[in-house]
Amino acid sequence: MDRSSTLWKAARIGLVLLRYAFGATFAYGAYHKITRGWLTTPVMREHFEQRLSEIDSNSFSAAYLRHFAIPLYRPIAWILTIGQVIVAISMLTGKGVRQSAALALFLLINISAGSYFNASMPPYLITALLLMLDKEAGRLAWEETTFEQLGVGETL
């Protein structure tokens, strides 16, 4: 696709807006956990135990919750919250977008494994994959800047 085309520009703008929305959602998730005391109280364990009581006890998610998430709820709360902060900052600043999208995908897969998969999850998973595949380094790039344009001779 020609990078100067209207479709290309619309796609880039759309992806950047999607990145901002993705970052804002992760920022809200981190804010919620921090302000509600998830890092210092057993709130996350209580959520996990509640979810465990609602699902099939023989499912993968039940085993995941019983043997991993519930016993390690405190480090999971910290990892999830810090991960959300990292993803939010990255998505909102455009720095390290591909790496943070991979982190977001890891966090989302673990959330899904705990039987928290719902209709809102596929768009987040797809967005994380799209941002991981974006080769524009998370920036609005209409044209490729070259050293030639700067008087040097190689592509940036």
Image: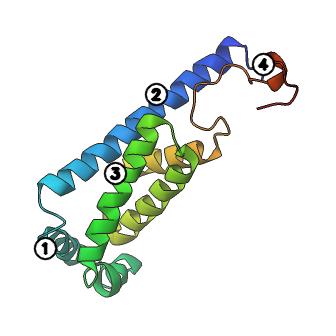
- Residue 70's spot in the image, x, y percent? 25, 81
Q: Residues within 10 Å of mark 1 (few under 14, many from 20)?
A: some
Q: Residues within 10 Å of mark 4 (few under 14, many from 20)?
A: few
Q: 121 or 38: which is nearer to us?
A: 38
Q: Earlier in the sequence, mark 2 or mark 4?
A: 2
- Residue 106's spot in the image, x, y percent? 48, 62
- Label 4 to label 3: alpha-carbon separation: 36 Å
| Lateral position of residue 17 relative to residue 30, left or right | right
Disc 2 marks which residue? 17
Q: Quadrant of residue 3?
A: top right
- Label 2 to label 4: alpha-carbon separation: 29 Å
Residue at x 85%, y 24% (from the top left corner):
152
Disc 1 marks which residue? 42
Q: Which residue lies furthest to the front in this view?
A: 152
Q: Earlier in the sequence, mark 4 or mark 3?
A: 3
Q: 64 or 146: which is nearer to us?
A: 146
Disc 3 marks which residue? 85
Secondary structure at numbered mark 4 = helix
Give the residue type at disc 2. Leu
- Residue 130's spot in the image, x, y percent? 58, 43
Residue at x 86%, y 30% (from the top left corner):
154
Residue at x 45%, y 54% (from the top left corner):
104
Q: In which quarter of the image is residue 27?
A: top left
Disc 4 marks which residue? 150
- Label 1 to label 3: alpha-carbon separation: 20 Å
Give the residue type at disc 3. Val
- Residue 98's spot in the image, x, y percent? 57, 48
Q: Residues within 10 Å of mark 3 (few under 14, many from 20)?
A: some
